[in-house]
Image (tube, rainbow, N blue to C red):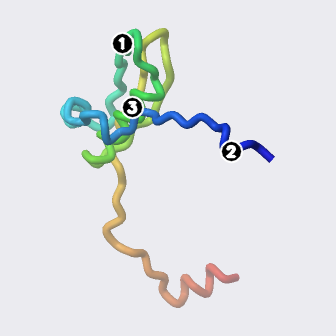
Amino acid sequence: MPRFEESVITQSKTLTSVNLEPAIRFIESLVPGSQVRLPLEENETSRETMRVLNAAADSVGVKIFRVGMEGNILKFRIVKTRKVDAIMTYTKKAKVTATK
């Protein structure tokens, strides 16, 4: 059994401590279907940047899909989220067909 009393706990930077406004303005300036090449600063990681971008995209109502990295350039695509406005209901005939 691990010795829990000897564990060392550090706090990582949370998204609540990051100002999302610049990322939100950036995401709002993009249109769905855009593929973006974002150069990262020397001390930034792609994982940290994607977390911020995803949080900003979520608040704007779009999704971001990471395409990859090319050196220090993060590549991602903007995709519009699909919201279901209506619930699909089955007719009796469709229910019977679906159960066969």
Residue type, label 3: Arg
**SS label for mark 1:** loop
Q: What amino acid is at disc 2? A: Phe
Q: For marks 3 and 1, give the one nearer the viewer.
A: 1
Instruction: Please name whichever residue, 87 or 51, is drawn nearer the observer in this view of the structure.
Output: 51
Q: Is residue 95 visible?
A: yes
Pick the front one: 10 or 52: 10
For disc 2, the neighbor class at 10 Å (few under 14, some 14 to 19, many from 20) is: few
Residue 2 versus residue 85 in the image, above or below = above
From the viewer's perspective, is 97 left or right of 79?
A: right
Question: Gap between marks 3 and 1, in whole Å?
Answer: 20 Å
Residue displayed at 41% across by 18% down: 44
Labelled pair 3, 1 in contact (Cβ < 8 Å)? no
- Mark carried by residue 41: 1
Q: Residues within 10 Å of mark 1 (few under 14, many from 20)?
A: few
Tell me which corner region of the image, top left, top right, bottom left or bottom right, holds residue 15.
Answer: top left
**Which of the marked residues, 3 or 1, is nearer the chain's N terminus?**
1
Residue 27 visible in the shown view? no
Residue 54 at x, y = what percent?
37, 39
* Among the two numbered marks 2 and 3 on one chain, the one whose residue lies closer to the N terminus: 2
Please name which of the two marks, 1 or 2, marks the residue nearer to the observer: 2
Q: Nearer the viewer, mark 2 or mark 3?
A: 2
Tag of residue 77: 3
Look at label 1 and name its amino acid: Glu
